[in-house]
């Protein structure tokens, strides 16, 4: 059996981490303020329910809502004097500052943040693959022993994540830009739908569902995240507000409007590729799928028979017709070959010649 890990918090992230670490041969114990959550997670195979009188962990992972993290970190630093302690909170600098105030042994605390999750909550939504090929940020501070940092980096690697190390303030600035403000943009779009007549909502397609999906996340959790990172989020929102004001002004100016829209395209293409690799030139091959049993299975079989590497795919539904569409992302130099092979197999397929980078 590998290192002993105590996970405090058996929600989506904590339970998923328990599943992944158990698979990696760690000895996992689970605790949650709602004992039934720990029992459910243990029943799913995420570890065993913690027993205070016998547990003596090598690593403690605090996977609770942000408001509870500093006090719990300080508590376990005192309670388990040989353990390295980390957390999975979405904001790092305020937690580090609080832990330094609360805990004399704060050197054994190594902040971290797996960039993984979903709009769902609770142990029943957990997956042992949640962290595979996802970024896990480790935020050491100057007081950490090198061995403590290495322990947390290894833990992240053992669940399949790609480790990035950066200072806590830089992490908080980055997540404001790529996570927190985009989440608010989703909420703003979704909240606007409250005033849209039901008849108009019937026209909604997959695009609006994609944009608003994460707006369904827990408001109480996101209140804690955003208030913890308010300064960085406010800075980004002021820039968004300036862009929105400019957009309103250029709506009647075709040339200026096109330049504005092109900035969005440029920003989208700047995102890193799959697994953190450099972006690749991509093309999407879209296939129409009839709404009938085993149609999707046949399509995946034909894609496999084509013998080409698929980078990504997305399934959408026609809001009117009884069909769906599978958009298959492949490298641009094989897009036409995939389209031809699927057409030859009897599918209605076409490619997006505009391409893109992922």
Image: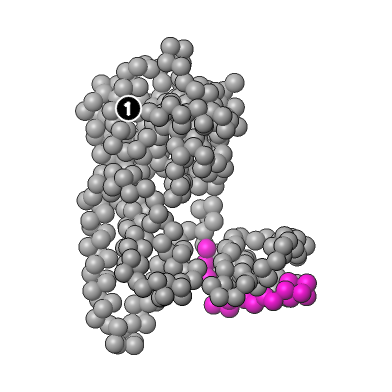
Q: Residue furthest front?
A: 198
Q: Secondary structure at mark 1?
A: helix
Q: Is residue 325 shown above or below 297?
A: below
Q: Which residue is mark 1?
A: 72
Tell me the quarter of the image containing the N terminus. Answer: top right
Magenta residue check for 343: yes
Residue 76 drawn at (x, y percent): 35, 22
Q: 334 or 11, which lies in front?
A: 11
Q: Residue at x 72, y 62 (%)?
A: 293
Q: 141 or 91, which lies in front?
A: 91
Q: 323 or 128, which lies in front?
A: 323
- From where the camera sits, is residue 130 visible? yes
Q: 192 or 118, which lies in front?
A: 192
Q: Residue at x 75, y 72 (%)?
A: 341
Quarter of the image for residue 246 reads bottom left
Residue 245 drawn at (x, y percent): 23, 74
Residue 75 drawn at (x, y percent): 31, 22
Magenta residue check for 232: no
Q: Residue at x 35, y 67 (%)?
A: 193
- From where the camera sits, is residue 177 visible? no
Q: Which residues are magenta?
A: 342-358
């Amino acid at each position: 059996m590998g290192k002993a890990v105590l996970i405090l918090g058996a929600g989506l992230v904590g339970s998923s981490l328990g599943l992944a670490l158990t698979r990696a041969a760690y000895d996992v114990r689970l605790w949650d303020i709602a004992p039934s959550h720990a029992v459910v997670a243990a029943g799913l195979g995420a570890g065993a329910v913690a027993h205070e009188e016998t547990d003596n962990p090598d690593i403690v992972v605090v996977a609770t809502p942000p408001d509870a993290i500093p006090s719990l970190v300080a508590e376990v630093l005192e309670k388990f004097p040989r353990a390295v302690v980390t957390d999975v909170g979405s904001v790092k600098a305020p937690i580090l500052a609080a832990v330094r105030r609360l805990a004399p042994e704060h050197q054994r605390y190594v902040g971290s943040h797996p960039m993984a999750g979903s709009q769902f909550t609770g142990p029943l939504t957990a997956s042992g693959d949640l962290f595979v090929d996802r970024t896990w940020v480790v935020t050491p501070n100057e007081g950490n022993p090198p061995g403590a940092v290495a322990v947390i980096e290894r833990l992240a690697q053992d669940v399949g994540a790609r480790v990035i190390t950066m200072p806590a303030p830089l992490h908080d600035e980055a997540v404001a830009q790529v996570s927190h403000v985009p989440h608010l943009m989703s909420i703003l779009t979704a909240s606007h739908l409250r005033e849209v007549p039901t008849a108009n909502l019937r026209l909604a397609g997959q695009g609006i569902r994609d944009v608003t999906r994460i707006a369904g996340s827990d408001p109480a959790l996101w209140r804690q995240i955003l208030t913890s990172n308010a300064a960085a989020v406010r800075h980004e929102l002021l820039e968004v507000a300036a862009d929105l004001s400019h957009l309103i002004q250029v709506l009647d100016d075709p040339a200026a409007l096109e330049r504005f829209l092109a900035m969005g395209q440029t920003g989208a293409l700047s995102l890193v590729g799959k697994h953190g690799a450099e972006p690749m030139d991509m093309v999407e091959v879209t296939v129409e799928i009839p709404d009938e049993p085993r149609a999707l299975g046949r399509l995946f079989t034909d894609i496999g028979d084509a013998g080409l590497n698929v980078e990504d795919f997305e399934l959408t539904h026609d809001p009117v017709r009884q069909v769906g569409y599978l958009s298959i992302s492949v490298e641009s130099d094989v897009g036409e070959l995939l389209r031809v092979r699927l057409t030859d197999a009897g599918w209605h397929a076409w490619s997006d010649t505009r391409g893109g980078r992922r």
